[in-house]
Image: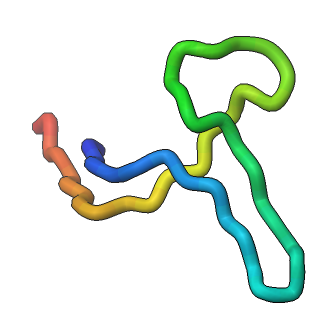
Amino acid sequence: MEFKGKLVKVLAVDGWRWSSSLTRNDTGGHSCELVWVDELNIINYD
């Protein structure tokens, strides 16, 4: 599977938020990424 998208931070009008890393080169705690997917390709390797 391949995908293209953007790393995002989610903010709701009621103050709720979902924060993730906005970079791909960090490590450790809180270094997970939340991605808005623009394109998704299923690859068959048979």
* Residue 40 vertical position relative to residue 22 in the rendered view, above or below: below
Residue 12: which quarter of the image?
bottom right
Colour mode of the rendering: rainbow
Give the residue at the far bottom of this rendering: 14
The residue shown at (57%, 37%) is 22
* Residue 4 vertical position relative to residue 38 in the rendered view, above or below: above
Query: In the visual, does 39 lie left or right of 24?
Result: left
Query: In the visual, does 13 lie left or right of 15?
Result: left
* Residue 12 vertical position relative to residue 39 in the rendered view, above or below: below
Query: In the visual, does 39 lie left or right of 32?
Result: left
Q: Quadrant of the N terminus?
A: top left
Q: Position of residue 4 (x, y in %)?
A: 27, 48
Q: Position of residue 44 (x, y in %)?
A: 15, 45
Q: Nearer the viewer, residue 45 or 10?
A: 10
Q: Position of residue 5 (x, y in %)?
A: 34, 52
The residue shown at (81%, 30%) is 30
Badge count: 0
Q: Position of residue 7 (x, y in %)?
A: 49, 46
Residue 40: which quarter of the image?
bottom left
Query: In the visual, does 18 lie left or right of 2?
Result: right
Q: Quadrant of the C terminus?
A: top left
* Residue 21 vertical position relative to residue 31 in the rendered view, above or below: below
Q: Nearer the viewer, residue 25 or 46?
A: 25
The residue shown at (81%, 66%) is 17
Residue 42: which quarter of the image?
bottom left
